[in-house]
Image (cartoon, grey):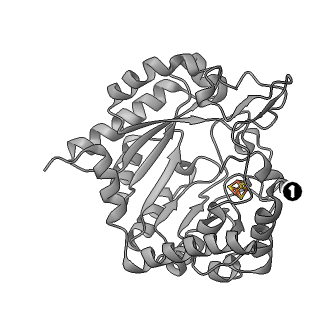
Amino acid sequence: MQLSKKRIQWLGYWQHLSFSKIWNLIQLYLSFQVSRLLQRPIMWGRPATLSIEPTTSCNLRCPECPSGLRSFTRPTGMIAIGLFEKIIQENHQHLHYLHLYFQGEPFLHPHFTKLIEIAHTYGVYTATSTNAHYLTQANVAKTLQSGLRQLIVSVDGITQEIYENYRVGGKLAKVEEGIRRLIQTRNERNLRYPYVILQFLVTGVNEHQIPALQEWCENLEVDELQLKSTQIYNYEDGSPLIPTNLEYSRYIPDGKGKWKLKKQPENKCWRMWQGSVITWDGRVVPCCFDKDASHVFGSVKENSLASIWRNAPYQAFRGQLLADRTQIEICSNCTE
Ligand code: SF4
């Protein structure tokens, strides 16, 4: 039977669910709602989603990214296979989504597909994000064997000039070649996964390419195109990165010559009740906006994630979110 692309994506997800994962998710959601009601952090479940950082290394020099700028104040490196396996072993029973990505280009980890295989063996749904510069024949073969369910490719321009405006040092021809190679090989082998999503961050620089983008994706047989709005750090005075079509913008004019967030943040964040982010060296941080690990709740090298998940610093962070999230710098410019 021929399944639609969207159904294939959902099937991959549902196949990795179990009663304990669903029950855990219900507990998390109830804790979140009760915490909002009582205005204090309650936590009954365990992390349902994780982002684990394979490496901080990157081949590109994107101007808004600490990997690209080589500007981390935290240590940089690659996750050890033993540490990764420990995290999966301890958490697989309630984990329903694992994103093997935080900062850096994951395919630069020499054993990246081995990491996916480990998670897949434990029955965890796996996804990753890449700039697609390393989809060589050998990496494509290993990726298809690994059990990876979702591959998100970041492309923010469909001509070399626009692409390299943000992806400094990147080669669009190489990206196209890699995506085509992966999808063609997958289809020739009658495999369903990985489901390939092309993610396009819309900015004032590339928005004019949106009409041609759909055809570009169809030509590559990409499974899904996602247009995403871009986070801009200093948006108050405007920026050339803010699209003129405000449908794709997180910011709008405030009527007094400045810019403001389109959606004013509320004192809540489901992400903080749903999952964690773990750096390559095992530090647990709140979410992917904490790129330099300014809020470390503990280390999975020393403690289990289950104990860190409910410890005092984690709960204090959740409590501050409920009380006034503008007091946390990373949360004040976040539309979550
Ligand atoms: S930055 Fe704050 S509000 Fe945004 S996802 Fe992270 S914890 Fe939640």
Amino acid marked by disc 1? Gln
- Ligand 1, by image quadrant, is bottom right
Apparent side of residue 158 relative to residue 56 in the rendered image (left or right): left
**Is 84 drawn above or below residue 106 in the view shown?**
below
Q: Mark 1 sits on what residue?
A: 327
**Is 294 drawn above or below residue 262 in the view shown?**
below
Q: Nearer the viewer, residue 139 or 287?
A: 287
Outermost residue toward the left in this view: 1
Please provide percent x and percent y for residue 317.
78, 68
Please provide percent x and percent y for residue 146.
37, 59
Apparent side of residue 176 relative to residue 163 in the rendered image (left or right): left
Instruction: Identify the residue at horizontal 83%, vertical 57% (top origin).
Output: 328
Apparent side of residue 317 relative to residue 61 in the rendered image (left or right): right
**Is 233 drawn above or below residue 218 in the view shown?**
below
Please provide percent x and percent y for residue 119.
45, 68
Q: Place residue 257 in its image quadrant.
A: top right
- Dot 1 falls on a residue whose secondary structure is helix
Does the rendering let one see residue 301? no
Instruction: Identify the residue at horizontal 75%, vertical 75% (top origin).
Output: 40
Does the rendering let one see residue 45? yes
Please provide percent x and percent y for residue 128.
50, 52
Q: Nearer the viewer, residue 150 or 255?
A: 255
Q: Nearer the viewer, residue 129 or 1?
A: 1
Apparent side of residue 245 relative to residue 13 in the rendered image (left or right): right
